[in-house]
Image: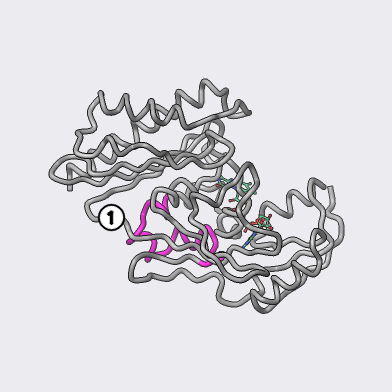
């Protein structure tokens, strides 16, 4: 199908972009890399008279190291995150998660802001960002505000952003001392297909025992899931008894639905397999130092 004609508006600042979005209301939509939006418009699932091009705003694609973490601008591409020396050094799990998205053509164009704002339930990056406690900076007609990523996803394709509000950047805190993190994704179809599910895990150790475990999952509910209620692992060895408790806690908090990539039952089973794999991988890395 061909795309219906639209006007591409090219603001030079965030304030101008927000003014345009407010002025044109439901006739306008922000566009980042366009990898999702243009497909949906070609399919006529969505239609806008105006697209507000965020790529015309200078400085939104920066990746910078800060005293307590890293800040990624909304227009940074997946590929630039994947290859960034700053991210690879400080937050390798984030580089890994972005490197798993689709294929290199998509990653070269798709933006971090577009990925999160799209809020598909299967996205690769959110689980890795959730275990690290990432926070979004947003700006809209009512000014600037911070939104913890754990409060950002409201439902399938639904976020906390208000009309006219834009995602400006994502701040990711540094990893805690003596911790390791991993992102594993499972593709039920081809290797670079959307994931059936994704698991991000972070373990912090103290005196040979677990000090903290954080888990987040994608693809197993309408939104990415940051698992609550894992404080019982403190001072434990991650043995089979504890593992069974972890799996039970996770199983209660997910609500997978059957789709092309697996039934609800299958996704629950594969979630358990991949949590075991992620924790085993982290355990061995921490033992090796
Ligand atoms: C073939 C293919 C395979 C893919 N596979 C995967 C995969 O395996 N894993 C995965 O995680 N993702 C996958 N994706 C999704 C990909 O990550 C998204 O297409 C991409 O992240 C969207 O980014 P974009 O910059 O192109 O957004 P756009 O298409 O420009 O926009 C997407 C949505 O976000 C909104 N938006 C964009 N930027 C902002 C902003 N700064 N503030 C507020 N709203 C904004 C737009 O209005 C629109 O609603 C795939 C996509 C394609 C096309």
- Is 199 located above or below residue 78 in the figure? above
**Residue 167: x and y, percent?**
59, 63
Say which of 150 and 76 sits in front. Answer: 150
- In the image, taking residue 203 as reference, residue 147 lies left or right, namely right
- Is 46 located above or below residue 267 in the figure? below
The residue located at (59%, 28%) in the rendering is: 257
The residue located at (14%, 41%) in the rendering is: 208
**Residue 154: x and y, percent?**
60, 46
**Which quarter of the picture shows residue 213?**
top left
**What crowding class fits label 1: few (fewer than 14 Cα within 10 Å), some (14-19), or many (20 or more)?**
few
Please name the residue that numbered disc 1 is placed on: 176
Q: What is the basis of the colouring in this image?
A: one colour
View extreme (top): residue: 265
**The magenta stretch spans residue 231:** no
**Residue 34: x and y, percent?**
68, 58
The residue located at (22%, 40%) in the rendering is: 210
- In the image, taking residue 280 as reference, residue 163 lies left or right, namely right
Tell me the element at label 1: loop
Say which of 91 and 175 sits in front. Answer: 175
**Which quarter of the picture shows residue 259?**
top right
**Residue 246: x and y, percent?**
34, 30
Q: Which residues are magenta?
A: 73-96
Q: Main secondary structure of the magenta part?
A: helix
- In the image, taking residue 224 as reference, residue 57 lies left or right, namely right
């Amino acid at each position: 199908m061909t795309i219906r004609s639209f006007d591409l508006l090219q603001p030079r600042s965030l304030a101008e972009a927000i003014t345009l979005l407010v002025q044109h209301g439901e006739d306008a939509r922000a566009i980042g890399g366009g990898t999702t939006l243009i497909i949906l418009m070609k399919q006529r699932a969505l239609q806008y008279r105006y697209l507000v091009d965020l790529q015309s705003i200078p400085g939104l694609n920066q990746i910078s190291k800060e005293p307590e973490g890293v800040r990624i601008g909304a227009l940074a591409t997946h590929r630039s995150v994947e290859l960034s020396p700053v991210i690879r050094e400080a937050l390798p799990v984030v580089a890994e998660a972005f490197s798993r998205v689709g294929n290199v053509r998509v990653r070269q164009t798709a933006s971090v802001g577009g990925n999160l704002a799209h809020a598909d339930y299967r996205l690769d990056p959110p689980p890795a960002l959730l275990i690290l406690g990432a926070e979004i900076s947003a700006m809209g007609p009512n000014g600037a505000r911070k939104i913890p990523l754990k409060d950002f996803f409201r439902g399938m394709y639904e976020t906390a952003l208000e009309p006219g509000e834009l995602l400006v950047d994502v701040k990711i805190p540094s990893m805690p001392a003596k911790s390791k993190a991993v992102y594993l994704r499972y593709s039920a179809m081809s290797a670079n297909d959307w994931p059936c599910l994704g698991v991000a895990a972070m373990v912090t150790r103290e005196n040979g025992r677990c000090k903290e475990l954080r888990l987040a999952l994608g693809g197993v509910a309408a939104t990415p899931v940051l698992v609550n209620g894992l404080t019982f692992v403190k001072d434990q060895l991650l043995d089979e008894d504890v593992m069974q408790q972890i799996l039970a806690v996770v199983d209660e908090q997910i609500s997978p639905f059957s789709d092309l990539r697996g039934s609800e039952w299958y996704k629950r089973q594969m979630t358990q397999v991949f949590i075991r794999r992620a924790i085993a991988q982290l355990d061995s890395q921490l033992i090796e130092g």
